[in-house]
Structures are given as C-alpha cells and as structure tokens.
Amino acid sequence: MVRPDSDTAPVTSQCAMRIGVPAYAVGLATLSAVAALILARRPGWETAAFAWWAACAIALAFTDAAVHRLPNRLTYSAAAGTAALLGSAAVVERDGPTWIRAMVAGGGAAVLFAALTCALRRHGPGLGDAKLMLSIGMVLGWISWAALIFGVFVGMVVQGGVAVVLLVTGRAHWSTMLPLGPFLVGGAILSIAVLG
C-alpha cells in the first residue's frame, strides 16, 4: 500500500469536479475533538499538544481517505508541534521521563512502520503512514506504552475488518488500496479516550 507522499496532492479530478469531503466536515470534526480535549481538563500545555496533534491528524485522516495521500507538510508539522508542546508540558510539569518515553514511542513507531513499508512494499503501510506514526506515537506514548499498543492494534484490526467486509461484499478487489491513515488516527483517538 505504498502511496506517493507529495505535498502537491490534487484536490480536483481531471474534469474539475471537486473530490473528497466538504471543508466544514473537517472543521467540525476538529472542533469536536479539541473541545473534548479541553473538557478532559488536562494540564494546559498537555492540552495544547493534544489539540495540535488532533487538528493535524484529523486533516490528515480526511486527506488520506479522499486522495490516498498523507502530505509531508502536515505529517511533519504534526510531529514537530507535538514534540515541542509536549516538551513544554514536560518542563512545566517537571516530567522529563514522560517526554522521553513519548519521543522514543514516536520514533520507534515510525521506524517500525518504515520497516514494514520496505519489507511488504505495496502490500504494507506507506511511508506517509510511517511519518504519521511519529506524532501518533508521541501522543500515545505520553499516556503510556499500553495506550500506544492499544491504539495501533485497534487501527490495524479495524482496517483489516473493513477490508474483509469490502472483499466479501464484492465492493473491493485484492488489488484495492485501502488507506491506513484514517484507521490509525481513529485508533489513536479511541486510545486517548479510553486510556488517557
């Protein structure tokens, strides 16, 4: 499932018809996620980090679902902003070990997905998914190792289940590429809600 990770993903088809979801759907989903994080009453910098990640991750999920691309400018922005804001949270809360765990989790998850991309080629995750895992690994690693494992496991299992259903119902073929990004983001959000 290797996909191009270009920043120049098309937003229109050749006949100039707009593709993807309406813009307000992304905004509403982002607003809902950020509001839920604020209501969770986490410490300020931690809330800022999770909100930044949610805003970037939701945009990435919708983009991947629409055009099978995870643009570098969004994946890198998600990772850089999340790392910086969690670093600020660690300084304010005097919790360096948690920040280190988050960084190791993000880097480790990204390397694992990149290795799967190289090993499985078009049948595995794409490099964009590996870049997305940088920020997902950070936010879930900030919570715990269990949160990271749970979030990734749920995302992969749900994607696999959806693929099987599509194959059985004849709505997809073995060569059909199902984007992984939305499922990884969904699994991460569920993990934050359950274990955060």
Image (cartoon, rainbow, N blue to C red):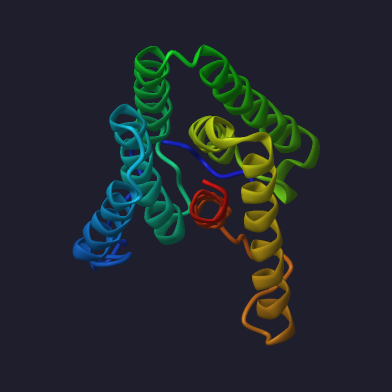
Q: Is residue 65 left or right of residue 32?
A: right
Residue at (28, 47) in percent of width and height? 38
Residue at (51, 19) in percent of width and height? 99
Residue at (63, 40) in percent of width and height? 148
Taking depth in this image into account, of 72 and 50 the one nearest to the observer is 50
- Seen in the picture, residue 99 relative to 12 is either above or below; the reply is above
The quadrant in which residue 24 appears is bottom left
Q: Residue furthest right?
A: 119
Q: Is residue 22 visible?
A: yes
Coordinates of residue 11 in the picture (x, y in percent):
28, 54
Residue at (32, 50) in percent of width and height? 10
Q: Is residue 7 visible?
A: no
Q: Residue furthest left?
A: 24
Coordinates of residue 32 in the picture (x, y in percent):
28, 59
Taking depth in this image into account, of 191 and 43 the one nearest to the observer is 43
How many numbered circles are shown? Answer: 0
Coordinates of residue 13 in the picture (x, y in percent):
31, 62
The quadrant in which residue 120 appears is top right
Taking depth in this image into account, of 103 and 10 the one nearest to the observer is 103
Coordinates of residue 107 in the picture (x, y in percent):
61, 22
- Seen in the picture, residue 82 relative to 117 is either above or below; the reply is above
